[in-house]
Amino acid sequence: MFLGTAVYRAESGQSTCRYAACTAIVVVACAVGAAYSYGDGSHFTRRAWIVSFLLAVFTFGVGLAFRRRLIPRWLTWLGTISYSVYLVHPVLLAVTDGTIGRWRENKPLLELAFYAVLMPLCMLTYRYVEAPGQALGREVARRVRRPS
């Protein structure tokens, strides 16, 4: 989010592109360095955090590059529920780890089942928790705004 704010400010003329680029370098270096230095000791876990973060930065860059183009509806839907996915997936992982356990190697059928549960669950949490919360936030902000 910090990097997104820096890019937004550079695009809107509130700062420079150089500042946004420096911010990107610092954010990536700090995140990768923290994952490497303070990981839980497992090489796999460190690598997973670093790769996940770099893929997130790459996804952000692709989105930034294509932001003025038409986006497929399913991708827009995934972006809409992405915060719910971010919040719900660790809970679902904890539940599955506690009930069926974690396998040493990936099982495509179990991964498919995980996503088959995660996506509808996130759609529900978006619709009944996140969207009403956003509406409430907008209403509170509207009421708090001082008239000019």
Image: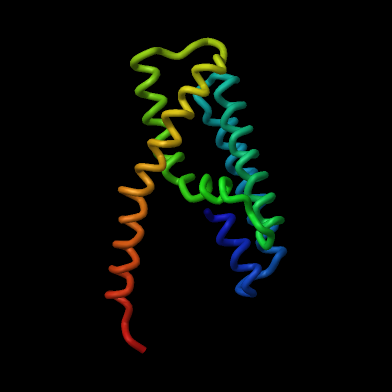
Pick the residue in front: 137 or 54: 137
Pick the residue in front: 29 or 13: 13
Q: Quadrant of residue 71?
A: bottom right
Pick the residue in front: 93 or 69: 69
One can see residue 22 in this view:
no
Where in the figure is residue 10, as x and y percent of width and height? 65, 68
Pick the residue in front: 108 or 143: 108
| 134 w.r.t. 119: above or below | below
Residue 22 placement, left or right of 133: right
Residue 56 placement, left or right of 81: right
Quadrant where the C terminus lies?
Answer: bottom left
Q: Which residue is drawn at 27% across and 75% down?
A: 143
| 83 w.r.t. 64: above or below | above
| 42 w.r.t. 144: above or below | above
Where in the figure is residue 16, as x and y percent of width and height? 68, 69
Where in the figure is residue 98, as x and y percent of width and height? 34, 17
Q: Which residue is drawn at 31% across and 82% down?
A: 146
